[in-house]
Amino acid sequence: MIGIIAAALFFGSIAFIAVQASRAACSGVLPAPDGPPPGTPPDALLIAAATLLGGLVVALGATPMQIGITALVVFALVACWCSDMLCGILPDVFTLAPLGLLLVFALTQRNWGLILSAFVVFVPFAAAAAVSRGYGMGWGDAKLVAIAGAALGAPLAVFALFFGCAAAVIGHRIVGWPQRPMAFAPYIAAATGIAIPLSLLH
């Protein structure tokens, strides 16, 4: 029980740091006129969700290595969620840096499945970003999706991201901004966060 509580507090702290880092990165950055409309990230909800996830990960018997990887992924997910809502961009420090660390880890551990999973989900999103020229699907989104692939494994990541994309389309229609791109990172982050416990069950 002590381990579960400690992990929950640790993950909550990671989310709090991610929120503050996002606000610092977006400070003074004006959203693009043709970008997603700015909004207010649900900071308290994100921290609470990360706290719950941390306790759940340990309760499910995650190894120290899995806990470390999940903590890194949670930082990226929370920071990207907030950044996309605040200024409509995903800074490389929140996408490329965590992805690079995951790939270096995979190379040192000869975990080719992690690299393949990141690549499999990255390719279609990268193609969408290239075709749309960043309108509606940006390269930051594609890099965040690669993190999801590395964290979840390709089969689960494809499944989770499918539902994340479906939720994004529905949410975009409900909000009623068909002529403006959506902040897509929150949907990717939510789908990935929900699927993380499932990745520990197999």
Image (tube, grey):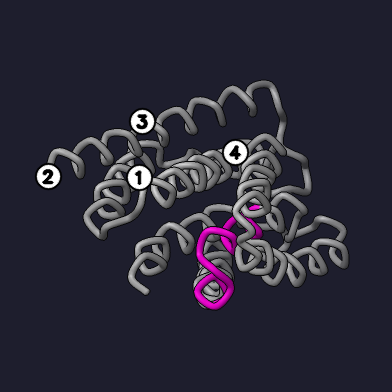
14 is within the stretch colored magenta: no
How busy is the neighbourhood of tag 3: few (under 14 within 10 Å), some, or many (20 plus)?
some
Question: What numbered label is drawn on residue 83?
Answer: 4
Horizontal and vertical percent position of residue 83: 59, 38
Where 128 sits versus 85, above or below?
below
The structure residue drawn at horizontal position 69% and vertical position 44%, both measured from the top left corner, is: 100
Q: Nearer the viewer, mark 2 or mark 4?
A: 2
Horizontal and vertical percent position of residue 142: 71, 58
Q: Nearer the viewer, mark 2 or mark 1?
A: 2
What is the C-alpha distance between the residues marked 2 and 3?
18 Å
Residue numbers of the magenta segment = 144-158
Please give the residue where the numbered disc 1 appears in the rendered image: 50
| SS assignment for the magenta stretch, majority | helix
What is the C-alpha distance between the residues marked 1 and 4?
17 Å
Quadrant containing the N terminus is top left
Mark closer to the chain start, 4 or 3: 3
Horizontal and vertical percent position of residue 96: 71, 43
How busy is the neighbourhood of tag 1: few (under 14 within 10 Å), some, or many (20 plus)?
many
The structure residue drawn at horizontal position 63% and vertical position 54%, both measured from the top left corner, is: 106
In the rendered image, the residue lying farthest to the left is 1
Horizontal and vertical percent position of residue 132: 84, 64
Please give the residue where the numbered disc 2 appears in the rendered image: 1
What is the C-alpha distance between the residues marked 2 and 4?
34 Å
Please give the residue where the numbered disc 3 appears in the rendered image: 13
Q: Amino acid at mark 1?
A: Ala
The reply to whether residue 100 is in sight is: yes
Q: Nearer the viewer, mark 4 or mark 3?
A: 3
